[in-house]
Image (spheres, coloured by chain):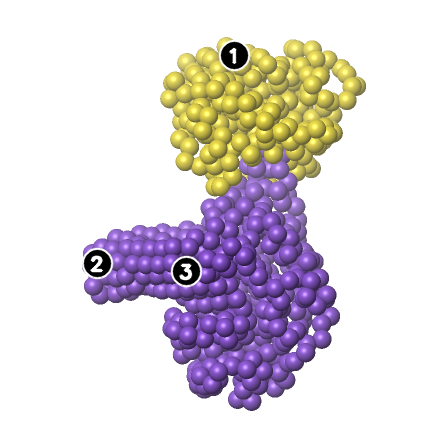
Chain colours: A yellow, B purple
Amino acid sequence: MPLTLTKPMAKTSKKISSHERPNKIDVLEITNLHANIGELKILNGINLTIRSNEIHAIMGPNGSGKSTLCNVLMGHPKYEVTKGSAKFNGKEILELEPNERAHLGLFLGFQNPLEISGVSMGSFLRLARNLNLKANGETKQISPMEFMPMLKGTANLLKMDEKFITRSVNEGFSGGEKKRAEIVQMAVLQPKIAMLDEIDSGLDIDALKIVAEGIVETFKKNGMGILLITHYQRLLNYITPDFVHIMAKGKIIQSGDKKLAKELEKNGYEKILKNIK
Amino acid sequence: MAVPVSTQNLVKNTLDNYKFGFKTKNKAIFKTPQGGLTREIVESISNRKKEPKWMLDYRLKALEIFEKKAMPKWGGDLSGINFEKIHYYLQPQDKPKTDWNDVPLDIKNTFEKLGIPEAERKFLAGTGAQFESEMIYHSLQKNLTKKGVIFESTDVALQKYPELFKQYFGKVIPAHDNKFSALNSAVWSGGSFIYVPKNVHIELPLQAYFRINAENMGQFERTLIIADEGSSVHYVEGCTAPTYSTDSLHSAVVEIIVKKGARVQYTTIQNWSTNVYNLVTKRAFAYRDAEMFWLDCNLGSKLTMKYPAIFLMEPGARGEVQSLAFANTNQHQDAGAKIVHNAPNTTSKIVAKSISKGSGRSTYRGLLKVSKGAKNIKSHVSCDALLLDGASRSDTYPTMQIEESEVTIAHEATVSKIGEEQLFYLMSRGLTEEEAASAIVNGFAKPIIKQLPMEYALELNRLIELEMTGSVG
């Protein structure tokens, strides 16, 4: 059953331009999405719509398909979409390469960010930013002189040592640094819809606060839509979601507001899953 | 993600991308006939060069050794080499020039296309250019000549500095070292001879560029570098060839003597076309507190077998070999390093990195030897292999012969495959699959590339990017 969401969607036919946000509302509309890995069915009909200025949280037990949903939406080659659609501002994205989805404005914050030896974070992010700008018809490229101060500012926001800019992508980063670096990337790449896959896992309480504040700051500034994947309610103490969805066996089985997360925290998944059945 | 490009396409891309594959029409003024290597051929080379008797004798002795020695069976596949078909000596002009204007136009144009005269103007202290069997150009900055630096074609050096020459020639790598050092010793021609006097530091690199142009060519240059006490020099060699359907052979011998407190860096950017067998013997002797550094980058050739060696002869000597190999379709890079600690308090380091793509094969073959009595040795060996697809291959054969107990030796080896996850991660940020793979490869090679002078680093990055176009499998 498709979810009915309460926030109004602004209709506009204007061409997308990053400078015109946040007036423009972007929409990611997922309909009856099914996906497999090999023979194994993982997503069994996901319906979800995410718009600019909305924070959605998806919660659910291990193996419910939360991470798969993010990966499928970003275009991971391991998964096969067997049915359904995902449209970004009306355009079907499921046939696109991951980089093309990134150029449209999708972002995935990884649960386990990969290490890329010898590639500096600073030059990599500038390349990525410029490729995104170019794909969106921007002829001007950002020079290192413009880019590096911006990156430093963002790093400071996430309380990261500025040296991370010259270090290899995620190489030798602690678990917490990797997660903070994902948020720095999100802030710099300015996506329209950001999916954050267990961004809170492996963080101590201080790091969790820093990461959450970074997300909230970027959200306030850019007004993108956010999809938070999380196991635990504790992240939601710092980021107030507009919508909370509970996922089990590849489906969203219940949606509500932030109270649902509290309820889940109190009663655990077992009870909710039982009640649904 | 992109559909894997078929092997056929990869081969085509590689050949198309090899921008050094052009041929120059050049009529040799003398060449030895095909039909196998004979005593007559060796004599005609020596006579043509008006060599002293001892050199002719040396060559003929080497020929006997070459004929006796069996083909090495332990490395790459050498069965495609046909000694009957090779032209062992091909002379493109009468003698080396010191002014590009005197070089025959067709040959000069070849080196213009390769950017050599331009590089010389911009950042070199001296330049040599070999076309087929002969150095056609050799020049050194005047201030260095005044300081007593010698930088000549090896043939010229034999005539001009007979005593110095005889004192060092063949002392580091004797003819009987291996089959191909014997072959080189019998038919050697061209190469660079360098002598750096005591306490002279040559700030800018000296460069030699080796170009094979003719089909079925054998190029056997001989390089000898002597860095006298407290001196330093950086020598760079580059090599390319046209793409032919038949195979060519490049078999050089490079001997280096690094005296007390001296430093020699020898940098290679080998980019032969994929029809060249590249079988090279390179060895340096480093004496008290001396330092030898081989920086060896191998991109081209059909098969390369090359293991730059350093013999640490006296206390305080230091040796380092850093290498990068890129094996693309139909290529085998069998490369590595040899370090022999013959004295106490010597240190060494080997860093070997290889990239294999499109069914290409790379092999690390290394020897670390510590002789009896060589106490307090420190050595660090690391080899990393990166495979770009499932069809590519990497092998590691590290050999250690340690005859002394007071040694500190570290050895690490890694093999990694460019993972779907890494590619996906970079693509999710907006890079295409090709851009992502290039970024990973460049990042992998960076520790080696950053050791190169800037101009060469840019060139090598560009060459790797060329190898990377045509997608990953």
Name of the residue lying farthest toward the right: A13
Q: Residues within 10 Å of mark 1 (few under 14, many from 20)?
A: some
Q: Residue at x 51, y 36 (%)?
A: A120
Q: SS for tag 3?
A: loop
CA separation in Å, label 3 and label 2: 31 Å
B107, above or below A277, in the image: below
Q: In x, y percent, where is residue B294?
A: 44, 57
Pick whichever, A111 or B410, lies toward us: B410
Q: Amino acid at mark 1?
A: Thr
Tag nearer the camera, 3 or 2? 3
Q: Amino acid at mark 2?
A: Lys
B29 left or right, relative to B238: right
CA separation in Å, label 1 and label 3: 75 Å
CA separation in Å, label 1 and label 2: 66 Å
Marks counted in the figure total 3
Instruction: Identify the chain of the residue marked 3, using the numbered disc in the image.
Output: B
Residue located beneath label 1 in the image = A240
**Mark 3 and 2 residues: CB-CB less than 8 Å, in contact?**
no
Q: Amino acid at mark 3?
A: Pro
Name of the residue lying farthest toward the bottom: B40
Instruction: Identify the chain of the residue marked 1, using the numbered disc in the image.
Output: A
Pick whichever, B170 or B441, lies toward us: B170
Say which quarter of the image contains residue B99: bottom right
Q: Residue at x 38, y 52 (%)?
A: B382
Q: In x, y percent, where is residue B331?
A: 56, 63
Sooner in the amino-acid sequence: mark 3 or mark 2: 3
Residue located beneath label 3 in the image = B197
Q: In x, y percent, where is residue B227?
A: 40, 61
Tag nearer the camera, 1 or 3? 3
Q: In x, y percent, where is residue A177?
A: 43, 27
The label number, if any, that marks residue B375 in the structure image: 2
